Every structure is written in C-alpha cells, then in structure tokens.
Image (cartoon, rainbow, N blue to C red):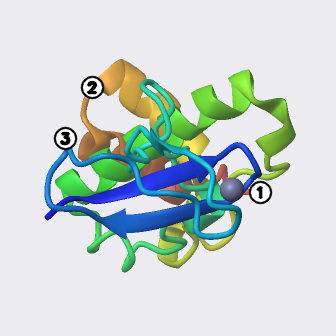
Amino acid sequence: MPLYDYACACGARFELMVPSWSSPAPDCPSCGGATTRRPPSPAVHGRGRATPPPAMSKAPQSWEGLNNGDRDTITHWRRTVEARQEFEANNPEHKEHRDAVAAHEGVFERKPLTYKELASRAATSKNATAAAAEASKDRVKPTAPKD
Ligand SMILES: [Zn+2]
C-alpha cells in the first residue's frame, strides 16, 4: 500500500496509507474539506543539486589519514578538494579561509603539504603519489651549507 502525502486548502498536511494510487483523496481530518495528493517528496532535492562536497577541513590531516599515501586515497581526496574548490568558487558563502593540510608530519613538519600544493603538483605529474613524493623530496632537499 502506497503512502501518500495529502494537503488541504486549510493548510493541513498529512500522510496516509491508501490501497492504491487511484484511491480517492481522503477528506481533510481537520476541516473535512477536499484534499489533494502531493507529489512524492523527492529524496534528493532537485537535479544537479547534489550534496556539496565535504569541507576541506574534513579531509584527512595526516599522512596516516591518507593511508600512508595510498594512491587511491590521495586521488579521492584531491578530487574531493578540487570539487570543493569549485563549489566554493560558485558559492563563496561556503568558502573556508584556510588551506587543508594533507600531511604535516615527518618531512612535512616544517612546511605542511597542503591539498592545494598536492593538487597543483598532481596537475603536472598526473599522479598523486608522484606528486606527494616530489613534494616530500622538495622538503628534504639539503639546504646550502652556510660557512
Ligand atoms: Zn482542511
């Protein structure tokens, strides 16, 4: 038996289980007037308006959170962050004023690896793992000896 949503001109709204879709609309339980069946409430609110991508602060903040650099995990989060950036560009009211950090331990301790950097590196290398490796190499590059 389908469950339908009914509305009355008086403002009453109610749900009712009816034998079939062709069952007549019931009388309004509050005023006795005629009611109309409302279209089923959609689970997703309209096409093309999916849930916004998670905020960057939801991205893992550590290398461990990235499964120690697992490629699929990194790619997933890089895409998520890119989607979020696009979403924020179109919806500035949702903008977060900080860069999400992908890794901050080990070689990244002094200069955390942000998703922004990861994304820009991956844009050229087309490989998030290679991008992360490059970023890490950059960090351990020996500084010129000062003497
Ligand atoms: Zn009514």
Point 53% across, 78% down: residue: 105
Q: Tag 2's secondary structure?
A: loop
In the rendered view, tell whether residue 78 sits above or below residue 146: above
In the rendered view, tell whether residue 45 sits above or below residue 114: above
131 relative to 130 in the view: left or right: right
Q: Is residue 104 visible?
A: yes
Between marks 3 and 2, how big is the CA–CA gap? 56 Å
Q: Which residue is mark 3?
A: 22
Percent x, y for residue 140? Answer: 50, 59
Q: Tag 3's secondary structure?
A: loop
Q: Residue reaching furthest front?
A: 32
Q: Which residue is mark 2?
A: 126
63 relative to 27 in the view: left or right: left
Disc 3 vs disc 2: Cβ atoms closer than 8 Å?
no
Point 76% across, 51% down: residue: 10
Between marks 1 and 3, how big is the CA–CA gap? 87 Å
Point 62% across, 31% down: residue: 87
Indicate the amino acid at tag 2. Lys
Q: Nearer the viewer, mark 1 or mark 2?
A: 2
Point 62% across, 60% down: residue: 32
In the rendered view, tell whether residue 121 sits above or below residue 95: above
